[in-house]
Image (cartoon, coloured by chain):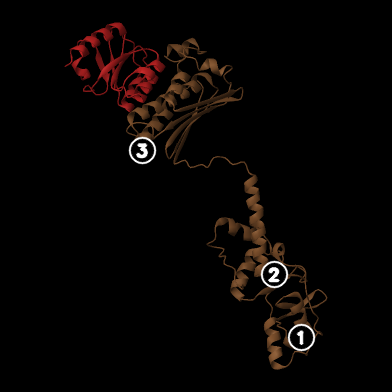
Amino acid sequence: MHINEITAQLEMTIVSGDSKTEVLGAYTSDLLSDVMAHANEGDVLITIQAHRNAVAVASHVDIPAVIVCNDRPVPDEMLEAGNEHGIAICTTPLSQYEVSGRLYTLFAKEP
Amino acid sequence: MSTIPINPEESPSFISELIYQLKIKDAMSTRLITASRTDTLRTVQEQMKEHKITGVPIVQGTRLLGIVSMDDIIRALNDGTIDEKVDVAMSRQLIVLEEEMPLAFGVSYMDKYRFGRFPVLNKDKELVGIITSRDILIALLVEFNKEAEAREQEPQGPPDDAQIRREFAVKKFDFEHAGKPTSEFKKELKGLGLAPRLLRRIAVASYEIEMNQVVHSDGGTIAMKVTPGTVEIVAIDNGPGIPDVQQALEEGYSTATEWVRSLGFGAGMGLPNAKRSADEFEITSSEQGTTVRCRFELATEEGA
């Protein structure tokens, strides 16, 4: 699914990047090494890590989008990094638990 | 053997260096067979026969007056002048070399003048030796031998067949630029058409050991070397070293500070991640620094 199709359900705003970015699954973690070890290519990253290194990690393992939870402010340098690597950045007031749960349901409904 | 098959311009650099390093005096023969101007040509002919030489310098003391060659003797035999003094038959138009000249001069003189031998003078114009193409070849062979032996003694490092080599400096706590080297490596490898899964493994290992330097070391370098069939990522830092490498390789063990952890690093997964991702993993550490080497085989990956 494309991230612009799930903004309402996840109460999220796409703050930078392509709104048509396609995600194939999701991985939830705030430990970046854990993300690198276990996230799959095409997963959206659900995290509270709002800094450029989270984007770097995403790019290394081909994560196309990052959802920053709990309305954590996204610094400009993170947006820049997102643009540089072609990774969409979204924010939401929801917690990682909420986002993960809702997204899990959405993926489960996918044909 | 009147010419030497060496062209100073087109020879391998080792030979052209050698013929400029060596001097005429290193190759010339100092065992001089000479005659005086009052000797007869027959005397010279006997000298040639006895010493198996083809030319005899004619001297007065150490001063070179001329040279009598085999050709001169043959002519004298023909003309019936063999019992006359050398004075009448010797060549006085002499091409000489100086002992301090590079051997390259000798090589080019041999080609240019087509003489079998050249008298060698010192800077005081005294005759000190004679040089033939044979002397030059022997001197070169001796030097080749010395060089070959010296090269055998040298510690043999693995031959450097790197096709691509990239290196970046990594600074302590420089989270801002962290990940850039890995991005560059990945970009480069992507261009080579590596399989996505392999690319990911390399990126993970590279980023982990890079972050390890950022978080724990006093700074260092991270490098990628691509050779036919392998990719190698090597991180070398300047200390302070890992006290217990085995422990550092255990998942969950970390010495990272709170604020490093708050960034999502320092969970004790870095080195284990890198190790798991690499086909070969090697770490050495002392107080002087830590070296982490991750190797990847290109052939083992499906679709690579």
Nearest to viewer (mark 3 / mark 1): 1
Q: Position of residue A91 (x, y in %)?
A: 28, 13
Residue B116 horizontal/vertical position (percent)? 65, 75
- Name the residue that disc number 1 marks: B41
Marks 3 & 1, CB-CB < 8 Å contact:
no
- Check chain identity for marks 3 and 1: say if they share one: yes
Tell me the number on the disc at residue A97: none
Between B48 and B31, the one lying in front of the other is B48
Give the letter of the chain under mark 3. Answer: B
Q: Are marks 3 and 2 on the same chain?
A: yes
- Looking at the image, is mark 3 or mark 1 earlier in the sequence? 1
Q: Residue B69 vs residue A88: left or right?
A: right
Q: Chain of mark 1?
A: B
Name the residue type under label 2.
Ile
Q: Marks 3/2: CA distance?
A: 57 Å
In the structure shown, which secondary structural element does the residue marked by tag 1 occupy? helix
Q: Tell me which chain the residue with mark 2 is part of.
A: B
Q: x%, y% of residue A60?
A: 37, 25
Question: Is label 3 in a helix, a strand or a loop?
Answer: loop
> Looking at the image, is mark 1 or mark 2 earlier in the sequence?
1
> Which hue belongs to chain B?
brown
In which image quadrant can residue B185 be found? top left
Count of marks, rendered view: 3
The answer for how far apart the CA atoms under marks 1 and 2 are is 22 Å
x then y, percent, for residue B241: 58, 21
Are callouts 1 and 2 both on one chain? Answer: yes
Residue A23 lies, with reference to residue B36, above or below; the image says above
Query: Helix or strand or loop: what does disc 2 sit on?
Result: strand
* Residue linked to disc 2: B131
Q: Residue at x 79, y 79 (%)?
A: B35
Report crowding for label 3: few under 14, some 14 to 19, many 20 or more residues within 10 A (C-alpha): few
